[in-house]
Image (tube, rainbow, N blue to C red):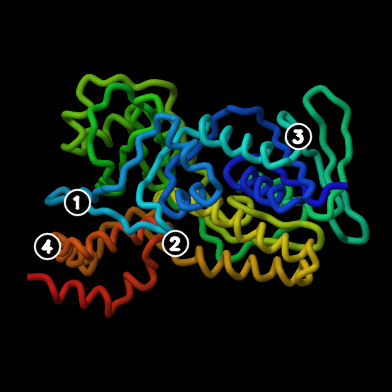
Amino acid sequence: MFDAIVVGARCAGSPTAMLLARCGYRVLLVDRATFPSDTVSTHWIWQHGMACLKRWGLLDRVLATNCPPFRTIGLDLGAFKLTGDPPAIDGAAVICVPRRTVLDKILLDAAADAGAEVREGFSVTGLMSSDGRVTGIRGRVRGGAEIEEQARLVIGADGRNSLVAKAVGAEEYNAKPSLSCGYYAYWSGVLPHIPAIHPRERRIVISFPTNDGLTITYFACPRDELAAVRRDPERHLADIIGLVADFEEPFRGRTRVERIRGSGDLPNFFRQAYGDGWALVGDAGYHKDPIIAQGISDAFRSAEWLTDAVHAGLSGARPLSEALAEYQRMRDEQLAPMYELSCSMATLETPSPEMLALYEALRTNPIERNQFFGTLGGAISPAEYYAVDNLQRIIAAAP
């Protein structure tokens, strides 16, 4: 019998398994994939996520993979540009954008090093239950016979299409439909430039450095254009890059490598995060449009919150159901403001007159400019920063 079985071994599952194993629990971590392997992802780790890696003792491993860290980011509004440095969080000041083939393997190995039993290439076929309580999983290694494993708690870290969430009927709330479709490509030989967000009419594109000297361009279009983008992603990528004057020199004559990846299945929801014998973490329990690229950092933070709750419950410090209810409350409270900001930006609507006035005011206010970029990374509460009285204060102070 395991104390916990974690289904899914990427950015939510491996840290959860690692942290629980470090607490002394017997943990089984399973994933149908083998590692290293890729997955559709924004790659981006904001300061919140970097602070988690630092606390876990994994930051140096990630930085040693040849993925360039940076701090300054920009917003290209066409008529003018803003740049700033988001505030540090718990001593973590830089941003890093590693490939998932690199990051996920580091996280998986850390879970194994902590003492978790890891089974790659293991597909979960269903959950076991008794008297309405989840008691374990059924599954198989490729080509093998189905087996059963029991646990005091089964944790679903298996993404937005979570088998665990479906099996337990986890209820969705505060849900919104898919708002955008997002695609990305890798390039070699791109000249160094400041990673910046480039909004255009019903479009947004951003570029940033990753491992092996590659640069990623990510673009988003409204969800109603998904069919057209799928038919010809090459043309849409070229058209959107052509809208950004700042890309002309860095991308001139550069080579795109690998295929264009992306998705139009970008739902926005919170799910019930726990029940009798089960819990959800990462995208399995909370998913939003990736336009601000918060998924990895949110998965890391949620892994810490869930570990604290599970440890409190399994150690007898408090009833497990009470501790898991507190985990869900904290998750929702901490992540709801960014959820709303992500959904707002994913509409790709033209900025309001108030936002245009804010951008104009930020041109001459570097302190507030850094705070503005801090809202994108989660260092500054979007709800507080975009409050009407705060915006009026910033705009009124402009020359």
- Closer to the camera: disc 1 or disc 4? 4
Between disc 2 and disc 4, whose residue precedes?
A: 2
Mark 2 and mark 1: Cα distance apart in space: 22 Å
Q: Are marks 2 and 3 in contact (CB under 8 Å)?
A: no
Residue at horizontal 61 percent and vertical 70 percent from the top: 329
Q: Which residue is mark 3?
A: 123
Labels 2, 1: front one: 2
Q: Secondary structure at mark 1?
A: loop
Query: Element at badge 4?
Result: loop
> What residue is disc 1 on?
77
Q: Amino acid at mark 3?
A: Ser
| Alpha carbon separation for disc pair 2 and 3 | 33 Å
Residue 19, given in percent of the width and then of the height, sits at 65, 50
Q: Would you call the spot at circle 2 few (<14 residues within 10 Å), some (14-19), or many (20 or more)?
A: many
**Placement of 266 over or under 215, stated as above or below:** below
> Where is mark 4, residue-wise?
364
Mark 3 or 1, closer to the camera? 3
Which comes before the other along the chain, label 2 or label 3? 3
Q: Residue at x 93, y 61 (%)?
A: 131
Looking at marks 4 and 3 on the same chain, the residue that comes earlier in the sequence is marked by: 3
Circles 4, 3 touching at the beta carbon (< 8 Å): no
**208 or 163: nearer the eye?**
208
Is residue 295 depicted above or below 343 in this figure?
above
Disc 2 and disc 1 in contact, CB within 8 angstroms: no
Crowding at mark 3 (Cα within 10 Å: few <14, some 14-19, many 20+): some
Disc 2, disc 4: CB below 8 Å?
no
Q: Quadrant of residue 117?
A: top right
Q: Is residue 147 left or right of residue 273?
A: right
Residue at the disc numbered 2: 338
